[in-house]
Image (cartoon, rainbow, N blue to C red):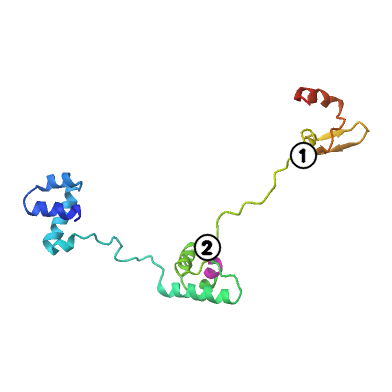
Amino acid sequence: MSKHRVAVLKVVAAQMTVTAAAAEYGIGRQHLQRLLRRYRDGGLEALEPRSRRPRSSPGRTPGEVRERIVALRTGLTSGGLDAGPVTIAWHLGREGLTVPSTSTIRRILHAAGLVTPEPRKRPRSSWIRFEAPAPNEVWQSDVTHWRLADGTEGRGLLMARRPLALPARLHGLRARLGG
């Protein structure tokens, strides 16, 4: 038995006051008064929880527009054409019907079961971590301009399989880095 029924029955049987029953069962006094009115009007069945759904939805998309959205989706998809919410909205406007927002069209398509769910995250790429076969096997230096011992020059990233003769100004850096 629910706490609402017990509280109402205790008050009706004069075992507790409304204030005491409300405090005992953790119900607001006004809500308990509302439950007592319902009990007097309809008995114990009237104490069952009621639906909170609104009685009317004036902003709801009309049924004919909903049916046309579903029909457009199936027709466009069967023809191999784009059948997204933007396209459907364009077709509805061309036909002179009320055009709901694209998010409303998407919700209608979801409710009709016409949207196949796709994962939001892209799968991780299968990259392989680069590791040199042995320590000091590959050197990399982020140098914007370099000149090698043999006199060749270049710009960009310097990368070699074996330690190279570095420019004289980098020798001190190499010694400080422990190379």
Mark 2 or 1 closer to N-term?
A: 2
Position of residue 72 relative to residue 177, above or below, is below
Check disc 2 and report the residue beneath it.
Answer: 117
Q: Which sits in the foreground, 139 or 119?
A: 139
Examine the structure image and report whether residue 43 is included in the region drawn in magenta. Answer: no
The quadrant the C terminus occupies is: top right
Question: For the view shown, which residue lies furthest in the front direction?
Answer: 134
Residue under the image location 70 percent in, 47 percent down: 128
Residue under the image location 61 percent in, 74 percent down: 80
Examine the structure image and report whether residue 86 is included in the region drawn in magenta. Answer: yes
- Secondary structure under the numbered disc 2 in the rendered image: loop
- Give the Cα distance between marks 2 and 1: 44 Å
Position of residue 38 relative to residue 92, above or below, is above
Check disc 1 and report the residue beneath it.
Answer: 133
**Proximity of marks 2 and 1: CB atoms separated by less than 8 Å:** no
Position of residue 63 relative to residue 174, above or below, is below
- Give the image quarter of residue 146: top right
Residue under the image location 19 percent in, 48 percent down: 28
Residue 163 x/y as whole percent: 84, 32
- Secondary structure under the numbered disc 1 in the rendered image: loop
Q: Which sits in the foreground, 85 or 176?
A: 176
Amino acid type assigned to the residue bearing label 2 in the image: Pro
Q: Magenta region's main secondary structure?
A: helix
Amino acid type assigned to the residue bearing label 1 in the image: Pro
Position of residue 50 relative to residue 90, above or below, is above
